[in-house]
Amino acid sequence: MAFIPAATELLPTVVSDAELSKKDEKQKIDIQQNSNHMTNLAITKCSGETQANLASVITQYVETLNQHNLRFLGYPTNQDFDYDALAPLLHFHLNNVGDPFTESSFSLNSSKFEVCVLDWFANLWEIDKGEYWGYVTTGGTEGNLHGILTGREQFPDGILYTSQDSHYSIFKAARMYRMQCVTVGTLVSGEIDCVDLKALLLAHKDKPAIINLNIGTTMKGAIDDIDLVVQTLEGSGFSCDQFYIHCDGALFGMMMPFLIQAPKVTFKKPIGSITISGHKFLGCPFPCGVLITRLEYINTLAKNVEYIASRDVTITGSRSGHAPIFLWYALKERGSVGLQNEVQKCIISARYLQHRLREAKIGAMLNEFSNTVVFERPQDDDFARKWSLACKKNIAHGVVMQHVTVEMLDSFVNEFIQERQIWFQDDGKRNPLCLANDIGVGNCACILHE
């Protein structure tokens, strides 16, 4: 049931350079004016502030956010959502403390919504209701902390293996849990190098392996091959009772099931846990996420707590009761067809961005099944901040989410081209850096590889 957008949806909106210049100047003035209004945020009045003054501050802040949102291109958070219907819930403190499957004595909770959300993700990743456990987290980092902890509890002396392109929270987990962590090399795409993984596994055959796999790396959007990693483990002499695999699917863990030819992320494979960030693809006003693991692993973590009449089995104690309802609302409102349409739109728009950059002789890489476009790092940090670009060494990236329009992409590329000419003239350079080692020879636009 593939969704094919109409050709007109992908046609760029024609915006002249003059119009872009006028729009840029207006945005600069608006942002400066709003910044001036935001300078008095200090909490100093003993008698409290008037509602009118508070409302004025928030109004100005919203205007500033709207301006930034027009150029929000570098991070994987969907800004295209509307939860106005849920406003009445803001009159309640909702707390899902404890195990969502063992409703606590804190009656103002949304556990029923949370379990519905968990059931939906369990079905997405093909694990039966009686075989899984999970909860709604504060985001991908908490999901990673729980997944790695679950693996560590299964194998207390296990070694954590993760690629050099992994999210920083994986290395944080290793430090927090005082685990031995082995960093595995990656291919130029950002995918884990299974040749290097095998050599490292063979060097530590005496200890179990706890593997973190990236279903979309942070910088390049590369997808680690679960099947190849399992083959590598087995080929290195590790049986299923000697390894644990956690999948960090922050963004792509939710997108890949809606791409027909993409590799399957499923519990039918020997994986132990998967986590995603709810605020990324689905979109949410605050960070949140989902962690799903196998029920059989949870008893080693769980402790009964009489005070809450539930089990303590999550990383945090008190948990947002609003987050599950927002996720439930997003899933119910769009349905599987709506989600698939959004995935297809993001993928096709990302291809459009890569095409525009390559057409302008700017090196750019786009991995298969990805909406993360990697390109040369802008020479000017102010330009990178203006577009909220994430940068690392020689490269930057744009993540084409639902709120990113073709007009925004055209504006970005046009401005990038103009600024680039200035940078290279000022530096006395005639050609960009070679990015062959960063994004591959076929994607590099330097004078040697163009």
Image (cartoon, rainbow, N blue to C red):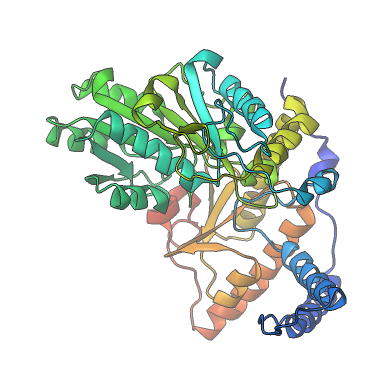
Image quarter hosting the N terminus: top right
In x, y percent, where is residue 209? 25, 32
Q: Is residue 437 left or right of residue 399?
A: left
Is any part of residue 82 visible from this angle? Answer: no
Query: Is 204 positioned to the left or the right of 391 in the image?
Result: left
Q: Between residues 150 and 431, which one lies in front from this camera angle?
A: 150
Residue 111, percent from left and from top: 64, 31
Res. 196 image quadrant: top left
Quarter of image, res 259: top right
| Vertical comparison of 266 with 113: above or below | above
| Residue 165 in sight here | yes
Instruction: Please tell me which residue is depicted at 35% across the width and 38% down the height of the picture.
Output: 149
Q: Position of residue 26 (x, y in %)?
A: 83, 78
Left/right of residue 152 with respect to residue 39 in the rendered view:
left
Query: With respect to residue 253, does 430 lie above or below?
Result: below
Q: Quadrant of residue 381?
A: bottom right
Q: How many marks?
A: 0
Residue 278 image offset from top left, x and y in percent: 62, 42
Q: Residue at x 64, y 51 (%)?
A: 77
The residue depicted at 37 percent of the width and 55 percent of the height is: 437
* In-front residue for pair 229/411: 229
Q: Is residue 173 above or below residue 294?
A: below
Q: Going 71% across and 24% down the picture, which residue do you hit?
A: 2
